[in-house]
Amino acid sequence: MKICCIGAGYVGGPTMAMIAHKCPDIRVTVVDINAERIAAWNSAELPIYEPGLQELVESSRNKNLFFSTDVDGSIAESDIIFISVNTPTKTYGVGAGKAADLRYIESCARRIASVAKTNKIIVEKSTIPVRTADSIQRILSANPSSAQFQVLSNPEFLAEGTAVRDLTLPDRVLIGGEQSPEGIAAIQTLVDVYAHWVPRDRILTTRLWSSELSKLTANAFLAQRISSINAISALCEATGADVDEVAFAIGTDSRIGPKFLKSSVGFGGSCFQKDILNLVYLCEHYGLIEVATYWNQVVNINNYQKRRFAETIVNSLFNTVSGKRIAIFGFAFKKDTNDTRESAAIDVCRYLLEEQAHLAIYDPKVTEAQIRKDLGVSDDFKRIEICDSPYTAANQAHAIAVMTEWDLFKTLDYTHIYQNMPKPSFIFEGRNILDKQTLEKIGFEVYSIGKG
């Protein structure tokens, strides 16, 4: 069997590397029109950072795992084609700011239709709106050859930072397809691929539309829990309660559970906000206005939390940060990844820059070029300094803002850091990973989210 994956990004690369590793009898080729990205996948420094990913790729690369720019050739010879391209939120036209931009999905479908001469199974791996498979099928049906296509939905449920672990031991693999004899046979073909290492009871099969909607719903529910506890964090600060204690207390209820109840400066990443806004747009499209309003509030609370955190920094520093050095600890949206998409650090930094602050930013995996791109500033913009260590960033800083929960930040010598900061010295804990009492004994004034 030969598998092709169109799209060498955060989903396509790791997923295909795992399939190749677990299925040595299958030839897996990841293709992309971005030659620079493909070159990185073929190098010793991959384009994305995930713990264990380098070793996983190297275990199969150039054996049965290949990265190539030959899109048409790989499409033509493959039995299964995964579509794993970006589906960003539209920035133009109808649905701007909410709907998914499906231009890359359509482009893939048209390319497959123009190249394929033999029967193919097409697998939606990108996050897409419900009934996108219908559009793909219509494009493929216009193929001038006699080739037949079955379209499946196989959404990813990876968490960045733990992608390799999630792929190795998934909670579930979801495969949706048409309930026709041909569709059921296609589903079974993909089930057999995953069954090389995933227990059969964890491979779920559904109707096509149910699978497509499940991805949006899962991310919406997870984000909802984060916004819910973040909303309570504001109340905790007002009343003197401790949000971690509240989260622990309600998390012991078996009906609720403890996961995704960690209060923070806000959620980020490529999926949560994009998928919720897509869900909102779908609800509006079908006239479900109250449902759309409900889910949109999850995003509103997330934006409120980021704004509230940034305003707290300004208010605590005597209502002005103009000309003051603020150390930003972390820029990725979460630890163990170099992904900055929708990172809370971006919004907080932009707010502080508007208040004329000088930012000294340190992140162990995010490049200077990416940080400047996200903040929309040039290399010669003087009020941003990208530092090579947290100690450099904190040197002579009026305050430290912890934006990413990198383990490194838990082990720093904060006594040394305190000695090299103007007094009073502030720490604003956006992730609640540091010991507030220890920091206060050193001399810091500490603001921790959700702790009155």
Image (cartoon, rainbow, N blue to C red):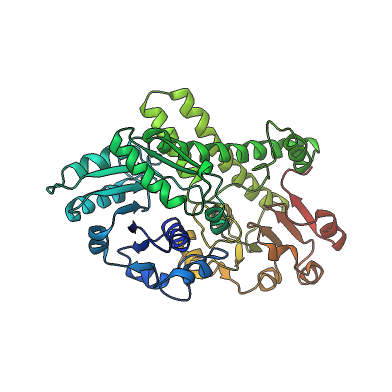
The answer to which quarter of the image holds residue 243 is top right
Question: Measured along the vertical axis of the image, is residue 396 above or below residue 26?
Answer: below
User: Is residue 342 shown left or right of residue 265?
Assistant: left
| Residue farthest along the right direction in this orientation | 441
Q: Residue at 66% of width from left, 70% of height from top?
A: 393
Quadrant containing the C terminus is: top right
Q: Residue at 47% of width from left, 54% of height from top?
A: 196
The answer to which quarter of the image holds residue 349 is bottom right
Of residues 375 and 107, the one drawn nearer to the viewer in this rendering:
107
Of residues 271 and 451, the one drawn nearer to the viewer in this rendering:
271
| Residue farthest along the left direction in this orientation | 144
- On the image, the x and y values in percent for residue 399 come to 71, 61
Q: Residue at 75% of width from left, 51% of height from top?
A: 447
Q: Residue at 34% of width from left, 51% of height from top?
A: 83
User: Is residue 390 shown left or right of residue 270?
Assistant: right
Question: Measured along the vertical axis of the image, is residue 389 above or below residue 312?
Answer: below
- On the image, the x and y values in percent for residue 248 come to 76, 40
- On the image, the x and y values in percent for residue 356 come to 58, 59
User: Is residue 71 shown left or right of residue 12?
Assistant: left
Quadrant containing the N terminus is: bottom left
Question: Measured along the vertical axis of the image, is residue 326 above or below residue 348?
Answer: below
Of residues 330 and 223, the one drawn nearer to the viewer in this rendering:
223
- On the image, the x and y values in percent for residue 128 come to 38, 42
Q: From this viewpoint, is residue 46 visible?
A: no
Of residues 181 and 426, the one drawn nearer to the viewer in this rendering:
181
